[in-house]
């Protein structure tokens, strides 16, 4: 019996070792190195990469597409020739390639032109995992790839890489375990400076469609570029990337709501182990509320292990730090931080019958309607004027924005605001009308940014 147990144990160890050693091959794709079998000849006419851009160390391996500063931009001439790509794929002589390209993207061939018009050119700031596609013998051939920082790509309105600019290859999300990859440097793609396997990034969809993307100017990291989705740089707006913003109180929101709230302030949401479900209840943050951070810096969120519903009074958490609420207020109505719009300079109407949004922005983004707790702040009925009743210190989220654009106005003190959510509609990329992304002129002290 002892021998039999020893044999079984040895076999289990061997099998375990084999399982751990099973890795997924990933082909390294260096900036500026032509592909061997691209959809479009890589002669520099379709797009160019920024070959001297070193990879940035990411906040985490998984990042959502609305993360501020995930991508970069430049004031140099455009790095993606979108019009040329459309002409190539709509040319009758390239009909077969166009069919395969559209099949990978998931659209009909006659929708290619409109699809490309909705994409936005950016530069990768991190070594990024994707599913790439070559074109061989009349068919698209998929392969997992690690794109070097500095490569120019077109991203969709969820912040996902969709096209590699220099060759027109369609891209899809990486769908394997990023912890079990083996990166292969071959076919002229040598290991680049700054490469670290532990620093590669996988991009997940933004919780809500984006209307603007907040980029870091790769030529001047102290400057930001606010770029409308579907534009190629002609409508860029600059902003000061050194400006700091206070971490808001996030406990009681869902993870997606907290992510959007932080994104609207120009801050990144991270989680210790991958990404939790979007409706997971946030219980605290690190650093805590009131901490001043500059554009693109990260806030690590903690969520309930299970059982807690979003909108319920959170358990005490040391990461919450001192409250910015008025301690003398005994108003039983649930309160949260005020909206970041510059037009909200004072407390909003305190009555429970307030029926409108508190922000003067062009559109508002209501909380995620997938929130299972209909008694919380994410009620799907935008016309119900019902405040959330809880303990005096219950933090109820205000309307989170989806835009990755930071506001230009420091957060106001957390005075009582209306607790009802606004309508859930596609959001603007701006928290308010006077933010850098929506202003017709840059904020004082901010240099103008040209096309990228």
Image (cartoon, grey):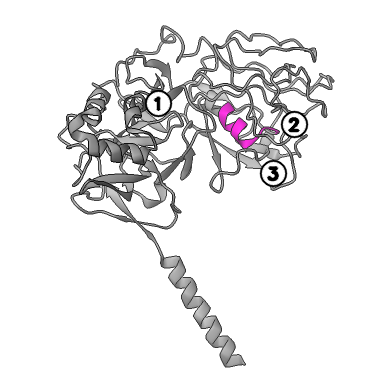
Mark 2 surroundings: few (<14), some (14-19) or many (≥20) residues within 10 A: some
Observer-side mark, 2 or 1, equals: 2
2 or 3: mark nearer the eye: 2
236, above or below 25, in the image? above
- The residue lying at 54 percent from left, 22 percent from top is 426
Depth check: 259 or 83 in front?
A: 83
- Distance CA(mark 2)–CA(mark 1): 36 Å
Identify the residue shown where x is 52% and y is 29%: 267
- Residue 105 position, x and y percent, is 37, 37
The CA distance from mark 3 to mark 1 is 32 Å
Where disc 3 sits, the SS reads: loop
Name the element at disc 1.
strand
Q: Residue furthest left?
A: 43
Q: Position of residue 32 (x, y in %)?
A: 21, 39
Q: Residue at horizontal 59%, vertical 27%? A: 261
Residue 177 badge: none
Q: Earlier in the sequence, mark 2 or mark 3?
A: 3
Q: Quadrant of residue 56?
A: top left
Residue beneath label 1, please? Answer: 215
Magenta: main secondary structure equals helix
In the rendered image, residue 234 lying in the magenta stretch gets the answer no
| Residue at image point 20% right, 30% down | 92
- Say if mark 2 contacts mark 1, CB within 8 Å: no
Per the image, label 2 sits on a secondary structure element best described as loop
Residue beneath label 3, please? 304
The picture quadrant where one finds residue 369 is top right
Alpha carbons under labels 2 and 3: distance apart: 18 Å
Of 282 and 41, which appears nearest the observer?
41
Question: N-terminal of the two: label 2 or label 1?
Answer: 1
* The magenta segment: 252-261
Give how far across and how far down residue 373 sits, in percent: 74, 35
Q: Earlier in the sequence, mark 3 or mark 1?
A: 1
């Amino acid at each position: 019996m002892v021998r039999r147990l020893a044999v079984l144990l040895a076999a289990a160890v061997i099998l375990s070792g084999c399982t751990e050693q099973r890795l997924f091959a990933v082909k390294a794709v260096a900036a500026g190195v032509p592909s061997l079998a691209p959809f479009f000849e890589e002669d520099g006419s379709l797009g160019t990469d920024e070959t001297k851009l070193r990879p940035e160390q990411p906040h985490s391996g998984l990042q959502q597409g609305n993360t501020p500063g995930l991508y970069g931009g430049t004031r140099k001439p455009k790095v993606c020739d979108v019009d040329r790509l459309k002409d190539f794929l709509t040319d009758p002589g390239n009909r077969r390639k166009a069919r395969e390209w559209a099949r990978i993207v998931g659209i009909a061939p006659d929708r290619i032109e409109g699809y490309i018009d909705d994409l936005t050119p950016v530069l990768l700031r991190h070594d990024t995992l994707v599913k790439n596609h070559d074109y061989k013998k009349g068919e698209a051939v998929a392969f997992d790839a690690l794109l070097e920082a500095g490569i120019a790509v077109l991203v969709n309105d969820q912040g996902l890489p969709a096209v590699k600019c220099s060759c027109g290859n369609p891209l899809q999300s990486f769908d394997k375990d990023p912890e079990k990859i083996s990166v292969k440097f071959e076919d002229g793609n040598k290991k680049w400076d700054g490469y670290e396997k532990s620093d590669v990034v996988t991009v997940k969809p933004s919780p809500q469609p984006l209307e603007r993307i907040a980029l870091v100017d790769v030529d001047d990291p102290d400057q930001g570029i606010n770029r409308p989705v579907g534009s190629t740089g002609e409508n860029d707006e600059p902003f000061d990337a050194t400006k700091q913003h206070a971490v808001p109180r996030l406990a009681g929101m869902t993870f997606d709501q907290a992510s959007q709230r932080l994104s609207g302030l120009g801050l990144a949401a991270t989680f210790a182990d991958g990404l939790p479900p979007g409706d997971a209840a946030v219980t605290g943050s690190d650093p805590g509320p009131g901490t001043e951070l500059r554009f693109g810096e990260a806030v690590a969120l903690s969520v309930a292990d299970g059982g807690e519903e979003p909108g319920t009074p959170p358990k005490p958490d040391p990461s919450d730090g001192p409250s910015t609420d008025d301690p003398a207020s005994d108003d039983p109505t649930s309160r949260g931080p005020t909206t970041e719009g510059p037009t909200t300079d004072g407390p909003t109407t305190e009555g429970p019958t307030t029926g409108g949004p508190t922000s003067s922005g062009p559109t508002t983004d209501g909380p995620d309607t997938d929130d299972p707790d209909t008694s919380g702040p994410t009620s799907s009925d935008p016309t119900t004027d019902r405040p959330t009743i809880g303990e005096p210190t219950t933090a109820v989220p205000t309307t989170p924005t989806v835009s990755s654009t930071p506001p230009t106005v420091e957060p106001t003190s957390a005075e009582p605001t209306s607790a009802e959510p606004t309508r859930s509609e596609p959001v603007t990329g701006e928290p308010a009308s006077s933010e850098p992304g929506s202003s017709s002129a840059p904020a004082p002290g901010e240099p103008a940014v040209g096309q990228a």
